[in-house]
Amino acid sequence: MNPLELKSMADGRAYKYVSLKLNREKRYADLTVRGPQADLPTTPEEVHKLGDAYWPLQAYRELDDVLLHLRVNEPETGLVCLRTEGNIDDVLAVDKTLAVHRDDWLIREIIAHMARVLRRLDLTSKSFFALIEPGSCFAGNLLELALSSDRTYMLNNPDESIEIATSELNTGALPMSNGLTRLQSRFLAEPAKVDEVLSHEGRFDTEAADKAGLITFAPDDLDWEDEIRVAIEERTSLSPDALTGMEASLRFAGPETMDTKIYGRLTAWQNWIFQRPNAVGPQGALTNYGKPTQAQFDYKRT
């Protein structure tokens, strides 16, 4: 398999389909995934011929690489703003090819790799905000990025075409570590809503997505920039250890598995909240609770 096409810069990294811009002073990053081009292969033979340049394989290898980079090399980056760029129809066309030919060994392995990368995102100790704007393509497999995020903001502007969509890959091909789909985890208390979302005809505009419970906030164009700015400033000001535990608990609702016990909720709570200096150190939150002094945090993430 050929090495990734990577351009490393002081303030980020650029691949063919993925780009990362680091805002180190504000402790957050912008991560953009670009969707596929039109007219990609539709048969296993064509996919085999294209090899590692096939969009689902190359894009998710790049996403995997950038997640590892953030984990290992950018510990003080506590928040990642996820965006997508591209055409929803092209994303759905790729998903259809993958779903129809999933019995082919290469396509089966590509889907398995996509699922592993998405689980790596779930298990990354950083906050994730998905920002759905004009030109976004959060559909099918890329909709999983929004569903895995801690918050999802979708611009509400009737003058712009802003939509999201589901595909067959959202029904179980890309499971979380708890064994559920991200839709099942999102609607754990209302399981009937999963079928409602999957049976929805056509795409979801902002109002439909908000009504269906697929997004967290739907600011209008007048409030969009301020809402995002305030949300970023608020999230990056909180204790990174407390956020690690909170995010793990919210991401992995429902059944407990060995993966979630080792890498998710249990490890997050036991190891990263009550025992570290951000909580019990001289300047920690618990030490300063009820005092006129303010906690001071080490913002390095695990």
Image (tube, grey):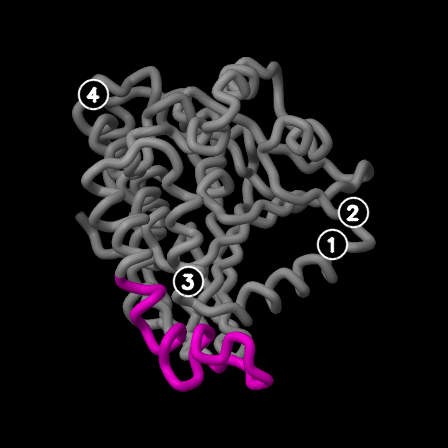
Please tell me in which quadrant of the rendered image residue 233 appears. Answer: bottom right
Q: Which residue lies furthest to the front in this view?
A: 290
Q: Give SS at disc 3.
A: strand
Left or right of 142? Residue 261 is left
Looking at the image, is mark 4 or mark 1 nearer the viewer?
1
Q: What stretch is highlighted in magenta?
A: 271-296
Q: Identify which residue is drawn at 58% across, 45% down.
A: 152
Q: Which amino acid does label 3 sit on?
A: Ala
Looking at the image, is mark 4 or mark 2 nearer the viewer?
2
Q: Residue 240, percent across and down? A: 43, 67
Q: Residue 299, percent across and down? A: 43, 75
Q: Which amino acid does label 2 sit on?
A: Asp
Q: Residue 31, percent across and down? A: 48, 57
Mark 2 nearby-residue class (10 Å; few <14, some 14–19, many ≥20): some
Identify the residue position indicated by label 1 in the image: 224
Camera-nearest residue between 33 and 255 = 255
Taking 146 as reference, is 125 above or below it? below
Labelled disc at residue 14: 3
Q: What residue type is labelled 1?
A: Trp
In space, the residues marked 4 and 2 are separated at their CA atoms by 44 Å
Identify the residue position indicated by label 4 in the image: 104
- Mark 1 vs 3, N-terminal side: 3
Q: Identify which residue is drawn at 33% across, 15% down.
A: 100
Q: Give SS at disc 4.
A: loop
Asked if marks 2 and 1 touch (Cβ < 8 Å), the reply is: yes
Taking 187 as reference, is 55 above or below it? below
Q: Residue 120, percent across and down? A: 30, 48
Mark 4 nearby-residue class (10 Å; few <14, some 14–19, many ≥20): some
